[in-house]
Image (cartoon, coloured by chain):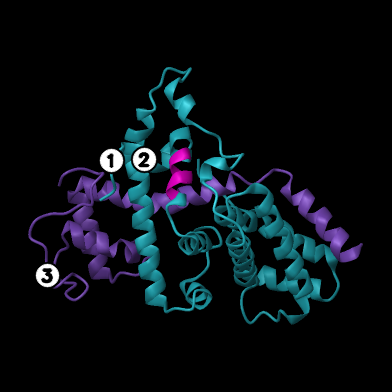
Amino acid sequence: MLVSLPEIPAEDDEVLVARARAGDYDAFEALVRRHQRRVYAVAYGIVKNAAEAEEVAQETFLSAFEHLDGFRGEARFSTWLFRVASNHALMKLRKKKPEPWGDVTDLEPSLSRAQSRSDGTSPFDALSQWARRPDEAADANEVQEALSSALDTLSDDDRALLLLRSIAESSHEALAERFETTIPAIKSRLHRIRLQLRGQLDERLHGKPPP
Amino acid sequence: MSGSTENPRHDGKDPEGVMSNPSRPVDCQQLVELLGEYVDNQLTAEQRVHVDYHMEQCAPCLAFLRQYKFAPQAVRDHLLQAVPVDLEDRLLSFLKKRTRG
């Protein structure tokens, strides 16, 4: 299942930021409502822990509120917000030892279900679906499990880069600035990450090593 | 072509690469190198025609493209589905206490 989120026009953010800066608390709450799911998802993808992802979301929006006066719209609000969120998440992650994805409580273990399905279908149905129509295989437990472990093979920075691009929809320009490199380098790195992720998913869904 | 789990590759690689000579058709390996720009709509019209033509003829490359495009979207959806349903309420309550309390 593909998750649909409403398009967020940048100009609407600018209007809300201006109103919030003028003291309209409802406008600030509208910004929080608009971005909270993506902020949490980026944080969760980096820190791999639900409680810490929520702390990152709290810190990020608190920071946004405290810096409203300094935000004059020279950059998109969302770009700034997700940059702050990824910074908070990476800092939190680097203060502790890494945990395997398997310890995350709300990532459901699917292996046992895959081995004893009550509906009579084979876990390999998801594998063949992955090759034919990967978008329609997304609900399969096997795919969810594969996604978690495939993500864990990426470095922290690569994970942050991927999530800032795919969830926050950050531009190549913003990512180049965030990671202090060039736009071609960012594009090349994203390509390598996508290839790695595809290969890791394929390894897990087909049981073969990635190319 | 050996299957969708392997990096697609035909014989007869173009050593100059399609980026340096976009008028030449692409082979499987070159197609993989172009996928990033393909999904970001940053190929020239001529390169795009070559890539589209190749994929019409090459089922493993088409499967590879679908998986390449799908993987980041699947990660995105996977993480968005992990967002707690009551996150918004908790977040707004926390922020109200901290900013107005």
For discs 3 and 1, the disc positioned in front in the rendered view:
1
Numbered mark located on residue B15 in the image: 3
For discs 3 and 2, the disc positioned in front in the rendered view:
2
Rounded to the nearest angstrom, the CA distance separating label 2 from label 1 is 7 Å
In this view, the residue farthest toward the front is A97
Q: Residue at x 15, y 47 (%)?
A: B1
Identify the residue position indicated by label 1 in the image: A208
Tell me the amino acid under the disc marked 1.
Lys
Residue B46 at least partly seen: yes
Mark 3 vs mark 2: same chain? no
Q: Which chain is mark 1 on?
A: A
Q: Which chain is mark 2 on?
A: A
B23 or B61: nearer the eye?
Answer: B61
Tell me the amino acid under the disc marked 3.
Pro
Q: Is residue A38 left or right of residue A204?
A: right
Which secondary structure, mark 2? Answer: helix
Rounded to the nearest angstrom, the CA distance separating label 3 from label 2 is 33 Å
Letter of the chain shown purple in the rendering: B
Identify the residue position indicated by label 2 in the image: A204
* Magenta highlight: main SS: helix
Residue A9 at least partly seen: no
Rounded to the nearest angstrom, the CA distance separating label 3 from label 1 is 29 Å
